[in-house]
Structure formats: structure tokens, C-alpha cells
Amino acid sequence: MAGRIAILAGDGKLPLLMHYVMPEAICVIFSGSPHQFEVGQSLINARFERLGELFETLKSEGVTTVVFAGSMSRPTLNYTKFDDFTHGVANQLCEMLRQGDDALLRFVLGLFDKNGFKITSAVQLIPDLVAEPGMLIGSYDKHREKDIQKADKLLELMSSSDIGQAAVVENGLVLGVETLQGTDRLLQFVAETDPSLRDHFQKGVLVKRPKTKQDLRVDMPAIGPNTIEAVSKAGLSGIVISPRTVLLIERKKMLSLADQRDIFILARDVRL
């Protein structure tokens, strides 16, 4: 791949993993956005309000390709700090902020593209981050097929409205769906559900898949060890993901923990 790569880092373990695998890559963090890099590491500090400045910095460093890694929350913008470039796209940016995450991401990707940067995905750089079809760990009984299918039908409806990427179904009952707060909050909500509303014999499942037409270069769903812990605390039996389109963070550790917690993980396409 010609030119240098820049990792635009959000929160979570993925940016650290990518930097470990590609130590020559430039790492960019954003003011006000959480990250897990240590103080003192060689980082470019950027602001969402100064995109033109960021583009010029990346070009001066010989960057031709960027990869978005980790979770980034919607920025709170300080309009007094906009550079000339960001002022020029401010009206469009504000409009996208009022729309769904997909619309905002498409707009931001377009800005990078128009400024000459190729956008790639973490999976293209590290293929082992996703799963091939099949059972990754554990097993499940066929009684859960109806729950998986119901979750998939629900996710199909949610996808058209750009709502979320995950749902929990237990014995035909919807215990929760992912919204702007994310999968961790969904699982916390399920864990706090009144036990009298739960099925004590057939534990539910978490189904997590990308939304329809989701740009997987920058917004790929992910599961990891924290997901396993949250699924266990929520009293669920397993996780179903889409093959090749859901990131597996700290894969070895995650599978070991799932084995300990008796939680299955299945990579399978939708079957409606």
C-alpha cells in the first residue's frame, strides 16, 4: 500500500491492536473523544472543528490512507474554533448532525475522499479480526432458532430507520434493542429486567449485525471480552453475529471467557 497509513483512533482496544500490528502508522486522537493510548506516545492531537488543519497535517506526513478504529461518540462542536475549511462545510455538517449516524459518517467519509485520502477498513488491514461462518465456541439447542429469527426480523425493521445493530430475544419476548447508547447499555438494561418477566428455563440470545447499507469501512459492529461479561450478567445463553462483518476484539481472550461462562458464539448469516 503506497504512502503512510493513519489510524483515526476512538475508544476501545482496536486502535491499540492496530498500532501494535502496524507500528509505522500514524495515530490520530481527537480532543474530547476518549481513547486508550498512554500519555507520551507519539500521537497527532486533532480537533473535529479543525478538519482542514488535520488534512494538511496528514498530507505533510505522507499519509495517503486512513482507517477509522474504535468507537467515537458524536462530537460536541465549538463553532468559535472552526478553521476555514470547517466553516465552509458548517451548514452541511450541522444538518448531518441532526440526522442518523450513517448520514453523518457518509458525510465525513466524503470529506476525506474529496481531500485525496483512501479510506480502508480495519479488516482489510488485519483479516483475522472477523469470523468465518460457523460456531466459534459452545453449542445451542434448536429451540433458540425462533428467538434468533425474531431478533433478525426486528433488526431488519430497525435498520431501515438507522436505530441500532443489536437485539435481545428470550423465548419469543423482546428484552431490549440497541439504540444510541450502545450494546453495553442494552445488556445492562436486560440484566436489570424484573426476573418475573424473564424465562427461567430458556435463556435468551443477543443478535448483533451491521445495519443495511452500513459503511463497514468505519462503522463495523464489534464484540469482545466486555461483551461476554455483559451477556453473562444479563443471564443470556449466547451471541449470534454476522460472519465477516463483526469485529472480534481480543479474540482469544473473548473465546476463553465465553467458554468459562458457558456462552456460545455463532457466526451465521440471516435466516428469515
Image (tube, rainbow, N blue to C red):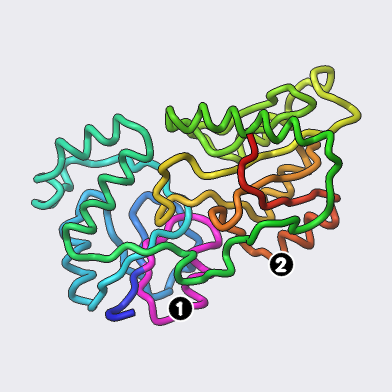
Residue 105 percent across, percent down from the top left? 33, 46
Furthest residue to the right? 201
Picture quadrant where residue 60 is located? bottom left
User: At 57% from the left edge and 65% from the top edge, which residue is drawn?
Assistant: 129
Furthest residue to the front? 272
Indicate which disc residue 252 carries. Answer: 2
Region of the chain picked out in magenta, as a range: 7-27
Tell me which amino acid carries mark 2: Lys
Residue 239 percent across, percent down from the top left? 71, 45
Residue 124 is one of the magenta-drawn residues:
no
Quadrant location of the N terminus in the rendered image: bottom left
In what element is the residue under mark 2? helix
Q: Tell me the CA gap for discs 2 and 1.
A: 20 Å
Closer to us: 191 or 214: 214
Furthest residue to the top? 196
Tell me which amino acid carries mark 1: Met
Mark 2 and mark 1 residues within 8 Å of each other at the beta carbon = no
10 Å crowding of disc 2: few (<14), some (14-19), many (20+): few
Would you name the residue on which mark 1 appears?
22
User: At 14% from the left edge and 44% from the top edge, which residue is drawn?
Assistant: 89
